[in-house]
Amino acid sequence: MIEPACNIYLSYIHDEYKKLLPSTNNTKNFWLPVKKYKSVRRIISDHVDNVIFLTTQNEFELVQKGKQPRKFQIENEEIKDIKCGLWTFLILTRSGKVYSLGSKNEYCELPFEDPENSTWEKLRYVKFFEDENLFVESIEMGTINNYYICTGNKLYGNGYIGQGRLGIPNGSNVKTPRFLFDDVERVFCGKNAFGVIYDMNKELMACGVNSSGSLGLGLSEPHVPTKVKLPFTTDQIKDLQIGEEHSTLVTLDGVTYGAGSDNYNGIGKRCTSFVKVPLLKDVQVKSIHVGKHQTLVVTNENEIYGWGFGNYKNEKESTDLVTNSKLPTKFNLPNLTVSGSFQISCGFFATFIYNSNEQNNIQAEFKLLLKNQQFTDTEFGYGLKGHKSLIETRTGLKIEQIQKVFQENNYTKNEINMFLKWLYSDEIPYQRNDKQSFENILKSLQLQYDPKETIIEYLKKLYNDEDSKDFLLLVKSDDYGNEDDDDDDDEEEEENFEEIPVHKFILLARSGLFREMFNNINENEKNINQIKDYSGKSIESLEILIKYFYFDSIELTADDDPQLIIEELEDAQEYYQLHEACSLNIFLRSLKIQYNIN
């Protein structure tokens, strides 16, 4: 039987980490209402009293203790991000619009037209940015401060200005978003963070409350942005998050640093500047998650380490390293079904660890390819179509075999569609009846469901399957662009191209440029099995890009010229119209650091 894909572990303020280690029979360690969620993309919360479950691209549920869950939907919009403060949520859409949901108060809420004391009942559109003709690219929230990075790296903020939290030395609290600084690329803050750190013009600047040195500024309490000293440049920072008395930083190459109180920074002694976390010196960390007094990190091996205190009132009385720990401690959560599929939401009073159906860009791209029904060459009836090479290579069956089984069993449109969604994006049904139907289809096709055999793992294996590659990418050789070559002979010109074998559906799913090129092929050439790339990039860099399409990561060999490869791929995301969530730029930044390239 297929297990539910969404397991949710919750811990909150008392005995924080003890509740992350579930006992076999005691369900009191869990906040039971979350168990009803069979599919969730993200969980956003600072406190168990107010939790948002993002369920689709534009819909979420607000769950509050003592109240019925309420659904909210933003029409004709896709949610890009949701952030939370202690009693407030901000929602950012991909069109740059900002909405607010939460309790209205003196400091952290925006001005509304009506005098209601509570705004939990409906989403409120923040019209300020529209009025000022500003496009919001990203948002961040502290406990009672909001930050908005707008086009042109212009930073706006509102909320409490006390102790320099907005970088404003004096004045009154800011209700309407106010312009703060230019040249701000990123804002780093966190739950109950009384200070904030800016990546300003390639310098790390901090202001606000620097309890125990949590901002890495020694012991000063700066009311205006002050430089944070680091042993590396800001472009090496992958993420940085701030708690009440500590901060945690991870670099692109997975090294973890801590600053602040000895109880919370993972180092075990007070550090007023950022210092490597000793117990993680041989561990590569890919993500960090910081709450008020707790930090969790996920390693490249998908292991979870945590440190800090959940029951902060009795922290010094505890000696159990599982319950409270000053140093990184590994956690075992065996019921997270798919390796690497879990997410963590670390809040002020609550920590969630959960399986998520938030799809990475590969899954999202393949799902979109199926939905748009572009360049399909196989029909299953009911108007459902697919891509023969993808379906045959992933199932190991001929299309005719699959079609025959569907006809013999009279499968419905809904059942066939469920099967296709699984092939393209790992999406499986969660309703009992649908799940049973899905299992019946797999059984009739003599296929087995393995949650670890995701489309990503399948693509990695497929990369080495030369026999199934059905398409050639023709790359112009080094003499491309030679204006002295006036030879128009087609046969001789063909010799100037080198071939990269690839699966056609890989190009269709992962590159908007190649989709456009296929769209422009005339009707008589629809079955063409090759296409020419006129980018002028070397065959070495394009071979690496194609490998990235399969692996979603980049590794150079000893024979590769890192300088050349990086230079040629830096504009690849825009030129080849890759998914906006594409991680190519992150890998290129990592390579620059690895090979010491400016």
Image (spheres, rainbow, N blue to C red):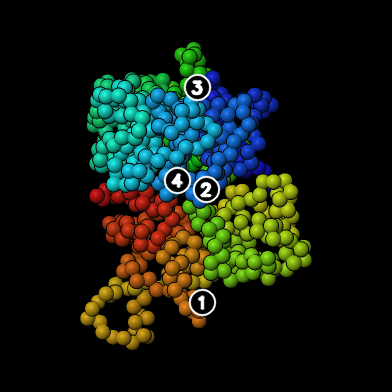
Q: Which residue is mark 1?
A: 526
Is residue 297 visible in the rendered image? The answer is: no
Q: How many marks?
A: 4
Residue 488 vertical placement versus 172 (above, below): below
- The x, y position of residue 121, in whole percent, is 54, 33
Q: Nearer the viewer, mark 3 or mark 2?
A: 2
- Residue corresponding to mark 4: 93
Q: Nearer the viewer, residue 598 or 292?
A: 292
Q: CA distance from mark 2 to mark 1?
A: 37 Å
- How far is the residue under mark 3 from the one under mark 4? 33 Å
Q: Give coordinates of residue 118: x percent, y percent.
A: 50, 27
Q: Is residue 55 visible in the rendered structure shown here?
A: yes
Vertical placement of residue 66 versus 204, above or below: above
Rounded to the nearest angstrom, the CA distance separating label 1 from label 4 is 37 Å
**Marks 1 and 3: which is nearer the front?**
1
Q: Nearer the viewer, mark 2 or mark 1?
A: 2
Q: Which residue is mark 3?
A: 310
